Structures are given as structure tokens and as C-alpha cells.
Amino acid sequence: MGYKVVVAGATGNVGREMLNILAEREFPVDEIAALASRRSIGTEVSFGDKTLKCQDIEGFDFTGWDIALFAIGSDATKKYAPIAASQGCVVIDNSSLYRYDPQIPLVVPEVNPDAVLDYKNKNIIANPNCSTAQMVVALKPLHDRARIKRVVVSTYQSVSGAGKDGMDELWNQTKGMYVPGQEVAPSKFSKQIAFNVIPHIDVFMEDGTTKEEWKMVAETKKIVDPKIKVTATCVRVPVFVGHSEAINIEFEDFLDEDEARDILRESPGILVVDKREPGGYITPIESVGEYATYISRIRQDSTVENGLNLWCVSDNLRKGAALNAVQIAELLGNRVLKKG
């Protein structure tokens, strides 16, 4: 016996990826529904070797459905998630709406699996921000060994983090650079993204940080440890898929780089590729379509006591969104619902 699963936002990048990963990982599905907005009714999406037609989320009856994976943005989630939850369906939400609610668990299965049990507070589980998800997978095993005091992270985030419009803008601007008169002005982003980098993701806050940077701070504290100090600079780069992060960590105790490398090699969800030679590291294009969070460039930082540097790369549509949501569903199934 399997689960009755809903994917809301099935026509978007993340929704389609959720369907792909559910099929790839052979999640025990008895019945599946693909939901979207009214304008996408009848749009076909793939689930393994099956083709599903999207249904209208408006008025959908979630009664009798076990799990709903939401990838519809905060505004729509605010309307539909409480409906699904009240009808007995556990919502796993990819938006930022519920991440900071103290009653709703924010879960990365490799990091804080026990938190999934708190789903019963509101029948909702939150998925973290894409940039946070891959970072905490790397931080947690190191924190368990040497206690992290402070993290300084600079991100290099792909345009897919801004959705299809972001990917289209990079593509069209790149083409336009080679065709006189067909230049494409910035629309999705504040400045040209083709052949450029933009140190601005999400809105600016009063203290000068952006909301994306604030998310990394708040979510790391909620998922790993509220005592960890985090400062982030988040940058959009002209890469279609795959987020990269340069992470500097200061520990309470000394942690040798070789021991850190061994710890990370043995940690769930991580693959270490760290050869000190040209090409002996992972770049974002190599992470596309993969489940792992890749760690490279592990080395001591001699400028602080007990410091370490590393390079972290992952497919943001997978570990940063769809994969993590499906892993939460698997965790929920194994620990609570116990079907399949």
C-alpha cells in the first residue's frame, strides 16, 4: 500500500522536478495529482512513464490525500496550504511562508530529521531556502565534531533560483549580445545578468542585508543551532542551474582539514571531490541532475583560530528545493505514516 500524493505547482521548474524525483526514487505512490492555477488546467506533465493532466488547485478536495508537495509561492500557499492541512493532508511547502513559524518544523533530513515529528502542530512542514539547504548539510557533521562559532558565506547562485523568468532572461540576454539591435534590457533582475554578477537577491532590508542573506542566517540557526553566528553575501551569477558557496567556518575546537575531509566523506548526502590539482573540484554544471551536495577545496584558514574553508556546490532545483521536499516525504512516511 502506497501514498496518495499531490504536487501543487506542477508546471513550474520545481514542481516538475518534484514529479521527476518522486518517480526516480520510486516513492510508493498509489495515486498522484498534479495541480496548477486555472490557466494551466489540462497542461500535461510527466511522472515517470506516465503523463498527468494538471487540475485546478482552486476547489481541489485534499480529503483522503496523504501528502501534498507545494511549489506555488508564498501568496498561493497562504491560501491553499491551510485548506489542505485542515482536510488531513500533510503539506510540505517549498515557499518561505512558514519557515520562521516556531510551530512549523523546518527540515533538512540529513541534519534535523527528528524535527519532522512536529508536523502535527499544523500539519505543515517547511522546506528551507535553496542556499541554506546545501550549506547546512555540510555544516552539521562538522558542528557535531568541533562546534561551529561563526560562518562567513559568499554564494554564487544560479538564475534558476529566480524561476523560469530568470532562466529566460539570461538566455535572451546572452543571445542578444551577439545580434545587434536585439539586446534585452533587465526585467527579472535589477541589472544585466548575462556576462555579469549581481550582488542582490530578494529585497533589501533596513540594515543593508538582502532578504536572501537574512534567510541564510535565520534558517541555519533554526535548523542547526541558534548559537551559530552567520553572515552572508548572496550573489546572482550567469549560471542556469547549480548554486555554489564559498564557506569560511570558525570552530570552538581545532579541526584538522584531513579529519574534516574524512567526516564529510562519511556524512549523508555529501560527496567530497577535493584534489589539489586543476579540475580536482566540482563546479555547478557538474552538479546538475545529481542528488549530492558536493564539497571541494577543504583547507585550513590560518587567519583565525580553529578556522576552515570549503567550497560547496549543489543542484538548487534538487537539494535546494524538490529533492529535499521528497526526502521529507520519505522521512514522514518512514517515521509517521508508515505505508508502502
Image (cartoon, rainbow, N blue to C red):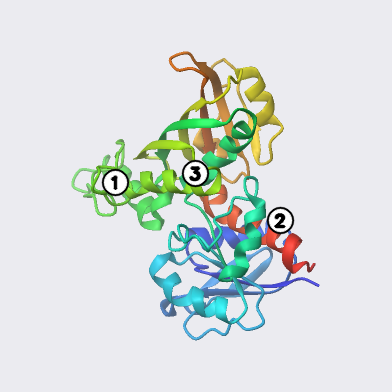
Label 2 vs label 3: CA separation?
A: 33 Å
Q: Which numbered disc, 2 or 1, marks the residue closer to the eye?
A: 2
Label 3: element kind: loop
Which one is earlier in the sequence, the residue at label 2 or at label 1?
2
Where residue 55 sits in the image (x, y, percent)? 53, 80
Q: Position of residue 148 (x, y in %)?
A: 53, 31
Query: Is residue 42 visible from the viewing direction of this image?
Result: no
Residue at the spot 47% in from the left edge and 51% down from the top edge: 129
Structural crowding at the residue carrying mark 1, measured as other residues with C-alpha within 10 Å and reported as few (<14), some (14–19) or many (≥20): some
| Callouts 2 and 3 close, C-beta under 8 Å | no
Please tell me whether residue 87 is drawn above or below residue 249 in the rendered image: below
x%, y% of residue 23? 68, 60
Front position in the image: 255 or 281: 255
Q: Position of residue 99 (x, y in %)?
A: 47, 58
The residue that disc 2 covers is 25
Q: Residues within 10 Å of mark 2 (few under 14, many from 20)?
A: few
Of callouts 3 and 1, the N-terminal one: 1
Q: Which mark is residue 226?
A: 3
Under circle 1, the secondary element is helix
Residue wearing tag 1: 173
Q: Give the residue drawn at x 36%, y 57%.
A: 165
